[in-house]
Image (cartoon, grey):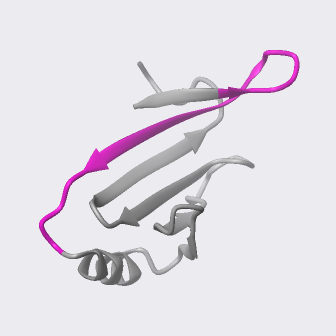
Amino acid sequence: MGGHYEDDSGNTISQSQTWFFNATDSRDQIVEYYKRSFPEATVSNDETGDVVFKCVPKGAEDGESVWVAVGDDGFRIGEECKPGKIKS
């Protein structure tokens, strides 16, 4: 799934992509996996209670990030980039 964000003038200021995954492992197992595999990420909870790992990759521009959100029914991996970096 992809999308974009616009400023008040209608100019695209960022693009995003998200991949959705079902998992047979428990939420706790997935969270522990990303704690080990994504140690540079900040960890928080979103408004739905999902555990979110987020980081800014080396070489990223201001406002760009990669994230993983782990919920009860699976997880999502996403990125937010400056316009034109996500190829159709």
Expressed as whole percent of the image width and height from the top left, the position of residue 65 reads 59, 53
Most foreground residue, 12 or 48: 48
Q: Which residues are magenta?
A: 5-25
Expressed as whole percent of the image width and height from the top left, the position of residue 72 reads 31, 67
Most foreground residue, 38 or 4: 4
Q: Is residue 49 left or right of residue 37?
A: right
Question: In the figure, residue 43 lies in which quadrant?
Answer: bottom right
Give the position of the N terminus as an image quadrant.
Answer: top left
Report the residue at 43% width, 61% height from top: 68
Q: Is residue 70 left or right of residue 51?
A: left
- Residue 64 is a magenta residue: no
Expressed as whole percent of the image width and height from the top left, the position of residue 13 reads 73, 29
Report the residue at 16% width, 73% height from top: 25
Most foreground residue, 85 or 65: 65
Whether 54 is drawn above or below 12: the answer is below
Give the position of the C terminus as an image quadrant.
Answer: top left
